[in-house]
Amino acid sequence: MPNRLAHETSPYLLQHADNPVDWWPWSAAAFEEARRRGVPVLLSVGYSSCHWCHVMAHESFEDAATAELLNEHFVAVKVDREERPDVDAVYMEAVQAATGQGGWPMTVFLTPDAEPFYFGTYFPPEPRHGMPSFGQILDGVRNAWADRRDEVGEVAGRIVADLAGRSLTGALPADRRPPGPEELHGALMGLTREFDAVHGGFGGAPKFPPSMVLEFLLRHYARTGSAGALEMVQATGAAMARGGIYDQLGGGFARYAVDATWTVPHFEKMLYDNALLCRTYAHLWRATGSDLARRIAVETADFMVRELRTDQGGFASALDADSDDGTGKHVEGAYYVWTPEQLRAVLGEEDAEFAATCFGVTEEGTFEEGASVLQRPDTEGLVDAERVASVKRRLLAAREERPRPGRDDKVVASWNGLAIAALAETGAYFDRPDLIQAATDAADLLVRVHMDWHARLHRTSRDGTPGANSGVLEDYADVAEGFLTLASVTGEGVWVEFAGFFLDTVLLQFTAEDGALYDTAADAEALIRRPQDPTDNATPSGWTAAAGALLSYAALTGSGLHRDAAERALGIVTALAGRAPRFIGWGLAVAEAALDGPREVAVVGPQGDPATVALHRAALLGTAPGAVVALGAPGADEVPLLLDRSLVDGQPAAYVCRHFTCERPTTDPEELTERLQG
């Protein structure tokens, strides 16, 4: 008989709807039930494409004996971290503080007042490698609750008090100015020290794609001409593009590499990684003209549209790491890896040998059981490109016959905002109107389904139906970023207006008096702590994303209120630039834009006129950090930057401004390009 999760919309929660565990979704009713029964709460947090979440579910939550123990002595609550990032953030902070590490599945035991007192992540079904079994954990917690409840309560109280003391509100540096040249140079030096000069990227294994840091380095190069900054971007971009973390057949990036060489990925593919990396490679092409960067940007955009687009026009969250290996067993990476024998079966002996050389497939393999993750060594000009393309097409067609990884098809507002920005720019750069249309369709969905009449956002939707979860800061900020980018590409000022609605909500609901930002709205559900984190992780933090969107909106509208809010938010970047540049990459990128102005470009001319199109393209391809672009016909007033701009001698013209103070207009695209170099 299905449990309570059968009524949820999250694919992750629905995966547990037939467990013998009597799961509850996160709700006041679940904690009221724990109070009524006098038992603790087991909080289990994961997400659909999480490999170890599936493992623990199979080993423990599908086990009848474990379920009986859980149901008798606990109220079990299951949370999709992608639906409720606020719940995840609060308890992950407690897990990391207590254990020094975190991850998913996250396993936390709570009092009926939602106060945590024992923590962990994955627990095996039997003791293993010094780790207790999940059953032993349940017995230990049950006994402690029965015999030492006062002690448990004291521990929970201390943890909650410690979390409450971590608020950044009122604790920001007195000087909240944005980073200046000195701090940004210091961040560059810090990144240089952590750069892997052999394999690209930063730090060691596991190695995550540093998209936001690369954006900072590109903007820093544009402003300063730093060859070292550009070299780090080029080396990292090439290593990732040629490594196993990139799907050499179908395009798109896996979540991270388990090694330092980008060889073996953790195979799940997330929308947010691909949106961020698509935009980064497009910007790398813009800065250098790299053919490799162009190919990866376009292939990644095509992957998102082909594999993640939903019937409603939005973009699904993720593809699983695991899939059926053909025997009924779900195995990580089964969809993506190849053996020499499999190559021969598809390609024949001669082409299989060629493919093995091109893609690094060996008898020993680079993954499990002699299989290899496809890589693409730098053989440009050394092999027959047409033959490579033919081999790729045939292998991809054969792969399509394999059982596909599962897809988490919920639409997350913030990640769709990132995808809108990436697809709009990639479409504009490479003359792909279909990608711009895909971005527009996703924006339409966010307005129709995710936005209510008060311009408040639902965080998720599925099958065109909004979820019950309110948007968090990153949703408002990333959607605003996507809409502002779409407006720059299409010239449709309505997207600026919508972005303004969302950013006004940021100011009213998420911003403290001192300029600090919270991850949840003032009127959101109260948790044991109001989450607040300025550091970038897999995506830009809500804090730094809001700073960037506020800055761009101010540049388009002349709003001093939004400019001031952006600068105050950037004060935390000043504090962290030298200490933790890898974890404030988007904040550093926004700071580069603030230092440069950012430059404001108004392009005025009849829609579709070749001269207007040429000026608009030159404006979009300008590398000045964070430059904003407004496009309109003479007399257009949808965007304040366009007000009172006119043709010059009857010709379309471009105005380059800072803080609404403009240079003389130009009608020459080449001159505009020169003005918009960093």
Image (tube, grey):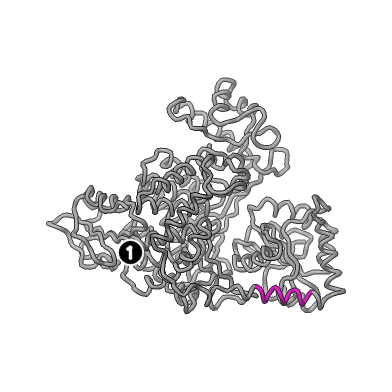
Judge by depth and name the residue closer to the eye, 9 or 330: 330
Q: Magenta stretch: dominant SS? A: helix
Residue 358 magenta-highlighted: no
Residue drawn at the location 42% of the way across and 74% of the way down: 504
The answer to which quarter of the image holds residue 295 is top left
> Which kind of residue does numbered mark 1 sit on?
Gly
Residue 156 magenta-highlighted: yes
Q: Position of residue 41 (x, y in %)?
A: 75, 70
Read off the magenta span.
152-162
Q: Position of residue 185 (x, y in %)?
A: 42, 56
**Which residue lies under the disc numbered 1?**
493
Q: Secondary structure at mark 1?
A: loop
Q: Quadrant of the N terminus?
A: bottom right
Residue drawn at the location 63% of the way across and 65% of the way down: 88
Furthest residue to the top?
350
Q: How many marks?
A: 1
